Each structure stands twice: as structure tokens, then as C-alpha cells.
Image: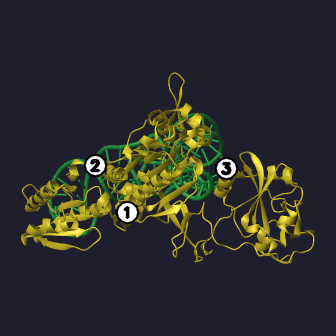
Amino acid sequence: MKWTQTLIPTLREAPADAEILSHKLLLRAGLIRKLAGGVYTFLPLGLRSLRKVEQIVREEMNRAGAVEVLMPLLQPSDIWEQSGRAETAKDVLFKVKDSSGRHWFLSPTAEEVITTLAAGEINSYRQLPKNFYQIGSKFRDEIRPRFGLMRAKEFIMKDAYSFDATDEGAMASYHKMYDAYKRIFDRCGVQNFPVEADTGVIGGNYSHEFMVPADTGENDVVFCEACGYAANIEKATSGIPKTAAREVGAAVEKFATPGVVTIEALTKEPYKVAANRQIKTLVYIVDSKPVIILVRGDDQLNETKLMARTGAVAARPATVDEIVPLLGAKPGSLGAVVNVPADVKVLADERLRGANDMTTGANEDGFHFRNVSIERDIKVAEWHDLRTVTAGEPCAKCGKTLKIRRAIEVGHVFKLGTKYSEKLNANYLDESGARNPLVMGCYGIGITRTLQAIIEQCNDKDGIIWPLSVAPYQVCITPLSVAAGNPCLQQAEKIYAELTALGVDVILDDRDERPGVKFKDADLVGFPIRVSIGEKALAKGEVEIKPRRGTVEFVKAENAMARLRELLGLNAA
RNA sequence: CGGAGCGUAGCUCAGCCUGGCUAGAGCACUUGCUUUGGGAGCAAGACGUCGCAGGUUCGAAUCCUGUCGCUCCGACCA
């Protein structure tokens, strides 16, 4: 490709609406342009890299035995009603109505469609296992699109769906995808690691996310360097000890705490109650019903865990106006010892099990109870792991110290079970002629997000540094003069032709620009290898080869191709 | 949706507080000359309904109200 023939609108300054580095680089290097919030046009260079990521994904999916299909973006709403997700996923669904008034959803994912397909086409265990995937646009009415391609309203996703006869088969399918994902992200040239994950609204019971470490990521990942444990903080547990039991004290005793409405205030004079001897009482509205949640004073409730444990679709903190009529006191004096309405469930964090000598609110403004023995004095309906792990806690597996870091979620694998196959009647006949629901898994990769994650990780002060595997062009040839008949241009054309014949993606910067401009742009766009041809070196029969991440080499023109083949890893071929 | 901020040239921004002649700068763009190994110099030129709608005023980019859009923090997710 000749530079002047394509469109590479590089920017000296980043547009003001880009906040994070990778978003700025996407815009500055001329890879994308915004049409509206969360909606982007891919320019020629951005599309080339996108296609390369797609191709890596396609190759690894095929290698893992998945077969490619293409499902409609326009999905009839009734299959969503049938699966129940018209309600549970309603906030992210783009809804459209056709001229006859029929409702459609723009595909945010395709479990309903593929399961409908499987219901019709898969009848026998002899056809199993099967794994179908597609690569294409997805639409999600994100409440807040963010950071360019990171969270967009329209994005490119690879989604795959496996169908098995048995749970063991489904686990095997799951692990094939898991292994394929590892290969995919490695081939894309990004550091990545799988973590245990919550399953969210998609459902299912076993799940891993693939993370790219980055400070601008939207996820906190808990990990142990010693044993390799890693989990999304929404899911993570630790080996932190339960609350130490003390001698069972006297009966519960009420005491005045005027003006004390925080855990912190109660730790001070004159009360001196350590946070770890307090019970924090929270009121949440879980699927529109109030629920009381107890965690230790020094712990934080994990809302994702709350939803996972209760199977809730929606959970939010209750407002003061909802709490006062319920418990008779304002937040800060809440407890579960007395005045708890019979129909309000009390959920407690496992860390409190067996705790005694605790202090908690008295459900009376300005008063607390002490000597509370949780199992004696509070009617706990359910015990769950509800707390959020913090850095420094011991690993549940090996006891070493847990750390936390930020990361970008680029892929997610779920074991779905029979949730969708049951609702959409996707069954098969087994060897004995019995009808069983297909056991499913689903597997997503955010292609556009992966592209941005690569940029977020591969850059320096001058711009992007593309890994060879996903670079829009692997080599940029920069003749310092493009005057017709100039030997620099002739040499450039020669190398260009030779590389092209080898199947290398190469771009020739044929712009009549000053060398500085060309060098700056080549660095900004981040081509892995630049070949510069200037008159002085050429007079000595030399050209200049500069890896984006490396130092300049002057090479005899006749040896240039050999050196380039070496740098491109083509010698084995 | 809750909180915060921003909408002036293709891009980055100044001007607004304290209303007043024809609305500015840098970069980018066009033409010419010079320059030619890390975002050149000089000269000339083109580019704006100051997001939109209403209001206040002799007069509004500037003050007020509404509205739309964008960005950031929170809830959601590939």
C-alpha cells in the first residue's frame, strides 16, 4: 500500500474527549473516528489490525474444533421473552419496531438464537459435541460508554456456544475454549491471565474471565503470586480468619451513643469498640424486597456476591426513607437484634459466624447494643460469603499474601448448563432414547476491546508499538525523497515489491513530506519495522532498518531482504 | 439514572467573570518562494449560523431559562 493512496489522518494533538492513553492513540494514529458517543468508524489502519485480531481468533477457534456461522443482528423479541432475558437484560437491549409493529432486539449476544437453532437441528447424541461461533457486531445500550472502544454501544465480538450431551462433555468443551483463549491472547502479543469470575446476567455456574493487566482497566483482580490463584474481586475469596470468639459475655446491653453514626466514630473515645468487634447492618432492596445484610465492621459488602448468592436480578442500597419505617431508626443506628419485621430476611457474612462480644446498632437513633452474640441474639436466615477481599489477606489456597491489580476483561468463558436449552426446548435423544436438554457453554471475546487493550499495553512516548501479529502493516518503508527518478524512491520501490511478493504487509510512505514528519508518523502509528532510505547511506550502498522497539541498523542494500526476513520471523519458511 | 465538568474554525484552545466596533491564536488546509534525517521558515489565502431554542438588553460568544450533545466519577458488561 502507498501511504498517499490510503487514509491515515494522524493528529498532533489528541481530541479533548479522549481520556486514556489507548483511546488517544487510536485517534491520533488515525485508526478510528467517533461518530457519536460509544459509536466509532474504523479507518483503514484500524480495520486492518481489527481484521488481524479476528483472524487469529478464527484460526484458534477452528483449531479448537468450533465451526463458524453467522447469526442475524436483528432478533425477534419472542425468543428473549422465552428465555426470560427480555426482562433481566432489558437495560442493555436496543429495541426496534418494524412497520407492522413487531418488536425486535439488536443482538447484544446470541444465546437465544443459537439455542433456537440447536433445538431445530440437533436431535441426537451422535451429533454432539458441537461448538458454533461467529464474529460480528453486537449492540448494547451501555448506560455509560467509556474510553473509546473499551465500552461501546456497538462493538465487534466473537461469541461461541458449545452443546454437549453431558456435564463432563460440557467441561471438556469449556476447557478447549479456555486453552484456545490463552493461545489467542498470547498470539495477539498481550500479557494476559485467566481469573475466576462471577457469571452475571448470562447465568450459569462456572466461569473465567481473561484479563489484560492495565491500570486503566475496569476490573479489580485478586491474585496470589505463590500459587497462581486469581479471581475477579466480584468473586474472590480469601483465607482470612473468622471473627475470634471470646468468652460468651453477659446478656445484650443497650447503651447510649448520641451522634454516633459511623463505624469509625464508635472506635473512638469513650466507646473504644474496635471495628472488628462491630456488626455493620445494611439494608438493600433485592428484587424490590428489603433485605438486611450483616458484615463485620471492618468489611465491605460485595454487591455482586449479594446478587449471586440471592439469585437476584437487581439490588441497590435502600434509601433513608425506606429504612426508617422498616427498622425505626436511621442508618448509623441499625441492627438486627430487635425490631426486625418478620418478612425481612437477615443475611450474614460467614466471617461473623460464631462471633460474640459484638456491638451493633439498636434500631433506635443514638443507641447501640453490646455483648451481642450473633447466633444467640440475631435470627440469621442465611449465611453467605458476602464480603469484599482486600489486598494483604492470606490466600485461601496457600496462605501467602493476596494482591490486587487493575485489568481489562477481554474474554469470558461460561459453563451455562441447561438454562437456555430447557427454556427454549433444545433437547437431544441419548443412547437409551431418553430426551435430555443440551448442556451448553458460551464464550465471548471483545475483539474491538482486545484491540484497544493491545494498544493500552504496547506503547511508548512516541506512540503505539504494534506486535508483529496484529500490526496494520508490518513494515513501513520511508524514502527520504520521493522525487520522480530519485534513487531513494527506486530503492524503496524495489524493497516494497520484494516484501509484497513475500506476502508481507508493507506500506510505502510516498508522501512528499520532510523526514521528521514521516518518522514521527511512523512511530505514532507504530509499525514494527521501519526501513528508511536516505541519499547519504544509499551512496554507500546502505539502507537503514529500525525496529520500532530497537536501534538503527545500517545494512547493505543487497542484504536488506535477508535481515528483514529474519526480523519478520520468515526464515524458517 | 445520581454527582461533576465541557460545548467558540478540521484539531488544541483563548475571549465569557466585568455585555460594546469586523470573534482570535497555534496546528492542519490552499498558493508561491526558500528549506530537506526527527512534527521547517516567510508571504498570501480559505475556513465560524460562538451546540440549539427562548428570554433580558439599545446591544449577547459573554447574563438568565430550557434543551440537545460530549467527557469524567458511580451502578452495568465483551
x then y, percent, for residue A499: 16, 58
Question: Mark 3 — residue?
Answer: A311
Dots 3, 2 in contact, CB < 8 A: no
Q: Residues within 10 Å of mark 3 (few under 14, many from 20)?
A: some
Q: Residues within 10 Å of mark 2 (few under 14, many from 20)?
A: few
- What is the letter of the green chain? B
Quick one: label 3 or label 1, which is nearer the N terminus?
1
x then y, percent, for residue A566: 19, 68
x then y, percent, for residue A533: 15, 65
**What kind of residue is marked 3?**
Gly
- Disc count in the image? 3
Q: Nearer the viewer, residue A440 or A231?
A: A440
Q: Is residue A81 above or below residue A27?
A: above
Is A218 on the left-hand or right-hand side of A548?
Answer: right
**What kind of residue is marked 2?**
Leu
Q: Residue at x 55, y 41 (%)?
A: A420
Q: Residue at x 54, y 40 (%)?
A: A436
**What kind of residue is marked 1?**
Asp
User: Which disc, if any, is residue A395?
Assistant: none
Question: Mark 1 — residue?
Answer: A186
Quick one: label 2 or label 1, which is nearer the N terminus?
2
Q: Residue furthest top?
A: A100
Question: Mark 2 — residue?
Answer: A7
Are the residues under marks 3 and 1 on the same chain? Answer: yes
Q: Nearer the viewer, mark 2 or mark 1?
A: 1
Q: Residue at x 19, y 52 (%)?
A: A2
Mark 2 residue element: loop
Quick one: label 3 or label 2, which is nearer the N terminus?
2
Q: Look at the image and give the colour of chain A.
A: yellow
Q: Nearer the viewer, residue A433 or A539?
A: A433
